[in-house]
Amino acid sequence: GQNIDQPTEMTATEGAIVQINCTYQTSGFNGLFWYQQHAGEAPTFLSYNVLDGLEEKGRFSSFLSRSKGYSYLLLKELQMKDSASYLCAVRDDTSGTYKYIFGTGTRLKVLA
Amino acid sequence: EPEVTQTPSHQVTQMGQEVILRCVPISNHLYFYWYRQILGQKVEFLVSFYNNEISEKSEIFDDQFSVERPDGSNFTLKIRSTKLEDSAMYFCASSQLAGGEDTQYFGPGTRLTVL
């Protein structure tokens, strides 16, 4: 079956570092994406991993281990505006075309 | 900065009615998508569309749903005979590429309420 697991909620303090984990079991794999979604708004793209290892983009980094079906999003120097849901999504290419499977999202609260 | 637009922002309809949700993807993008998100739940892929035909669709996208690119700029999602459980936020997205880092740009969404 297709399954993506993320913690439901996390809390961290302004200026701190937080790691949001994602594990996945999908029949096909062609890349993993992280999106940020503020309440009532559309998801916005944060990062993409298709090979094992760490991708860094400013305050945000994303890691992938394909053998473990595991990814994490690392947010550094947290700011209040980082309070949002973070969505892990897998692109599944089982059928030869692409289907996108999202996790339920992790709601991050950043406290002053 | 170019963006995906969607209309209307909120649609209220009676159960059994047909609705058409409209999207204008980013102009040089070739791949188009519809997603839905029931309140408090995860984003669910509905369908992808390329070269005037459906590329992939999920189990949710049954005969009740259809998509169309009627005029080269709009991309529509039609829901025939709406049901209460169709109430959700519907997001359109577009990307320039498929595969690789095909960054999908999401529109602001249409909130559909079925009464």
Image (cartoon, coloured by chain):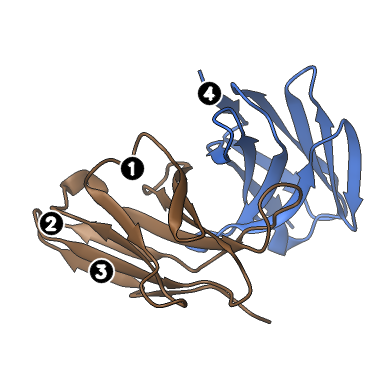
- Which of the labelled discs sits on residue B61, or is there none? 1
Q: Colour of chain A?
A: blue
Q: Is residue A103 left or right of residue B72?
A: right
> Which residue type carries mark 3?
Gln
The residue lying at 71 percent from left, 58 percent from top is A82
| Label 2 to label 1: alpha-carbon separation | 21 Å
Q: Is residue B87 visible?
A: no
Chain bearing mark 2:
B
The mark lying in front, picked from 2 and 1, is 1
Q: Nearer the viewer, mark 4 or mark 2?
A: 4
* Real-space Cα separation, disc 4 to disc 2, in angstroms: 32 Å
Residue A9 in the image: above or below residue A25: below
CA separation in Å, label 1 and label 3: 20 Å
Chain shown in brown: B
Which chain does the numbered disc 1 sit on?
B
The chain to which mark 3 is attached is B
The lab-note entry on whether marks 4 and 1 share a chain reads no
SS type, badge 1: loop
Q: Which residue is mark 3?
A: B11
Dot 2 corresponds to which residue?
Answer: B115
Residue at 54%, 30% (x, y): give it: A95
Whole-Å distance between the Cαs marked 4 and 1? 17 Å
